[in-house]
Structures are given as structure tokens and as C-alpha cells.
Amino acid sequence: MLTFAADWLNLLLRWAHIIVGIGWIGASFYFIGLDVGLKQRERMNPGVYGTAWQVHGGGFYHVEKYLVAPEHLPEDLIWYQWEAYLTFLSGFTLLIVQYYLQPQAYLIDPGVMPLASWQAIVLSIVGLAAGWFAYDSLCKSPIGKHTATLGAAVFVLIVAAAWGFTHVFSGRGALIHVGAFVGTIMAANVFAVIIPNQRKAVASLIKGEAPDPKYGAIGKQRSVHNTYLTLPVILMMVSNHYPMLTNHPQSWLLVALVLIIGAMVRHFLVRHEAGDAVVKILWAPGVAAVGLVVALVLTAPRTDPALAGMTVTDADITAITQTHCVRCHSAHPTREGFDEAPKGIKFDTLEAVKRYAPLIKAQAVDTDTMPLGNETGMTAEDRKKLGAWLAKYL
């Protein structure tokens, strides 16, 4: 019953995280698209920077953006903030349920670093917090005045964090932490910079003073950062389903490629929304395509020549699966916390092992994703034997 409740809690948290995340991403994409699509017209209200005409849902909308703020604050001002806050809160709660409550299975890999559960959790929290302070310091430093230099510095910061996580946590744990690292920066941008700056502008209006334009400029900078980080962070959040990413020996390099690919795709979309001619911005998807090709080459499956000459019997494979697999993937799992086989996949017989040969190769031969946290101590020799035997059924 406890496992049943935990599964439902996990499912509901994921559902909530996706729902509020869609709301946040949608709002971010809309407002950045609106911002770059603004046009200055012959007749505009005082203080208006630009306007946009839009059509949706059978109606027309006329939107104005003030360079700093209107002279009088409307009573029905709508704030966009809770989408970001709830995305972070639901995501961090999911991190607790999935990784902090089961660190030995999902967060820790003794082959990477033999950590106690509490050590892994502390490193996780400290790493996420340090990421925000490092990023915020970069933005507030002289580097923050130069868009390209700051962008390069933030890129290096995230890749460095990815390298660090891959040398501390399991493959799954490392890449999910890259996503959480970036997501924390994005949410903190809203909570600690964008919304407070907007409140300062509102406070000035209430006092009858002209708001300082620097607060709007700073908020705009952080909003632009958020929109360019959105596509990479989404991929990081689903990376744990793809061992070719999480268990690649240079997964930090794949993170760098994902950052480039995602940012280039987002740049193309932003500039297209701004009305730029496609021929002038085709370089961005071109760079993304090159990055994708490099990622495909890096993750392409490779056959170990040593496997061809190995003699492996059915008895060998039965011993390996009984030792390392069936405690979870069985009609009657014996591992604590498992009432039934994950995803209904069972390896009680050799015929079942043959049936799932491609999946086993991806999870336990090409990578060391399984067993979870390698808690059964599956050796490299075991994986080679398994790979040699499975090759006959692929």
C-alpha cells in the first residue's frame, strides 16, 4: 500500500509540475514574442514604447507597452508570477520524492562517488543554491553590461556545473540536477529580480514619482535569459528516460550541445516572431543542426569487438539476471519498495530476457543505468557477457 501511495504521489506531482510549467513557459514565450513584435506607430499614447495588434479566439487585441510605466496605475493590474513559483515548488518537491527519499537508487552511484544519503542531499541543495548566487553575481558584475560576454559566462557556468554533477551523482541524478540548477536560476530570476523590480515601479507610481527605468531594463535582461534557457531545461528534465544521455561518459559535453541547440532554436523563433526575414536568421537553425549532428555522433551505439569472441552460456545469463535483475523485474519482486515489476517488465525466464534484448542492451550493456545505483555490484565483465549473449537476439 505504501508503494501504491508513493506512485500516486509521484504521478500527481509530475502532472502538477507539467501543468504549471506549461503555464510559465507559455507566458514567457507569449510576452517575449509580444515584446519583439511591438511596433512604433504614428499615434501612440504618451510614454508608450510600442504597440501590437493581435488576433486570437475570434477577437482582436490592441496591446501597448510603456517604456517605463503608465502615469497612473490601473486597479486591475495582472501579475504573472505564480506560474514560475509553482513550477519551482512542484519540481523541488518532485526532486525530494524521487531522489532525496530514494538516494541510493537514483541519486548515488558508488562507482562515481561513494556518498552517504545525507551527503548527496546536502551536495544537491548546496549546488542548486550556489548556482543562483554565482549566476546573479555574474549579472551584477561588469560582465553583466555586455550581453554576449554575459551569455558566454552563463553558458560556461552551466557546463561547469554539469561537469561537477557528473563527478558526484549517478548519471540520472547528474542531468536532472543540471535541469534543476537551470530551473532554480530561472525561478529565482522571477522571485528575486523581476517581480521585486516591478514592485519598485508600482511603489514609485503610488507615490506620484517617475519609476527608475533601470529596474525595467534589469527585469528584461533576466526575462530574456529565461526564455533562452527554457528549451534546454525541458530536455534536461526528461533526460532520465534516455540512458544515451545520462550515462554517456561525457554527458557534460552533451549538456553543452543541448544548451547550444536549444538556444539557437529559441533565437530563430524569437527573431521570426520579431519579423526578421528567414534568410537572415537561418544561421541559427544551421548551428543547431551542427550541434545535433555532433550529439548523434557522440551517442551513436558502438559494438565492443571483444564481445564477438566471448562464449556465454544460457546458464551464465540465468545467473546474471537472477543476481542483478529479478529482484525488481520479476512476477514477485523482492526489493524493498517494489510491489510489482517496473513497467511490467519481468525477466523470470530466458525467453523474457530475449524479448527485451534491445532494452536490456541500452540500460545494462551500453550504459550502467541498471541495476538502479548498481546496488547489486554488477561488474563490467557481467555486462560484457550479457552484451555478447544478447547480440544473438538483436
Image (cartoon, grey):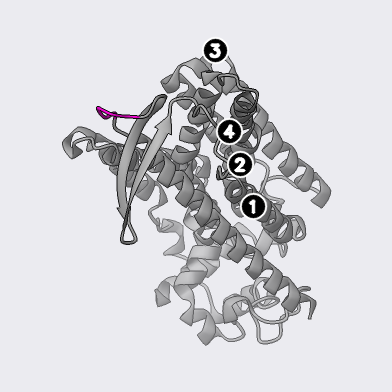
Between the residue at mark 4 and the residue at mark 2, the CA separation in whole angstroms equals 10 Å
Which of marks 1 and 2 precedes in the sequence?
1
Which of marks 2 and 3 precedes in the sequence?
3
What is the secondary structure assignment of the residue under circle 2? helix
Residue that badge 2 annotates? 187
Q: Quadrant of residue 358?
A: bottom left
Numbered label attached to residue 86 = 1
Numbered label attached to residue 171 = none
Circles 1 and 4 in contact, beta carbons < 8 Å: no
What is the three-letter code of the residue carrying label 2?
A: Ala
Residue that badge 4 annotates? 194
Between the residue at mark 2 and the residue at mark 1, the CA separation in whole angstroms equals 9 Å
What is the three-letter code of the residue carrying label 1?
A: Leu
Residue that badge 3 annotates? 142
What is the three-letter code of the residue carrying label 3?
A: Pro
Question: Magenta residues: mostly which secondary structure?
Answer: loop
Between the residue at mark 3 and the residue at mark 4, the CA separation in whole angstroms equals 20 Å
Which of marks 4 and 3 precedes in the sequence?
3
Magenta span has 41? yes
Q: In this view, does 210 lie above or below 106?
A: above
